[in-house]
Amino acid sequence: MRIVALAAATVAMASAALAETDGERIAKILTPAIKSCWTMPLPPEGQKALPFSVSFKLGLDGSVSERPVSQKEPSSDYERLMIASGVRAILKCGPYSALAASGLPYEAWRDIDINFDPSQTTF
């Protein structure tokens, strides 16, 4: 599994055979779109916004084919809000037609895991 660093998120590709250059190309396509749609809720006073992961599948045309889901159960109301903000960003910014037009094999970008990192976002 390759992990590609993004400004406000990281993309982990499910395919172990994915070349790092493919992962970088995928990240360059997804990063600006998802980052521009992500509105992170401010944490309650004294609480730190923690990273969270969301997984989703894309169709051949780059549309989100299954509702994005968190990889863990939220432990607080704020964490639930954070995860919901990531899911909204993914849905709002789709379809990711630039991936479909990228020439990358569909198997390389069909299954996406995104790790949203609030520490990379300024309030």
Image: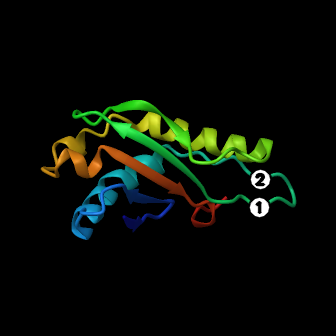
For badge 2, the amino acid type reads: Pro
| Above or below for 118 versus 41 | below
Q: Point out which mark residue 48 bears.
A: 1
The type of residue carrying mark 1 is Lys
Q: Residue at x 29, y 65 (%)?
A: 24
Q: Quadrant of the N terminus?
A: bottom left
The residue shown at (39%, 53%) is 32
Q: Label 2 near label 1: C-beta < 8 Å?
A: yes
Q: Secondary structure at mark 1?
A: loop
Is 14 or 123 nearer to us in this picture?
Answer: 14
Q: Quadrant of residue 17?
A: bottom left
**Percent x, y of residue 122:** 62, 62
Q: Is residue 56 above or below residue 45?
A: above
Residue 63 position within the rendered picture, expressed as x and y whole percent measured from the top left: 32, 32
Using the image, tell me which numbered label, if any, was put on residue 43.
Answer: 2
On the image, which quarter does residue 49 sit in? Answer: bottom right
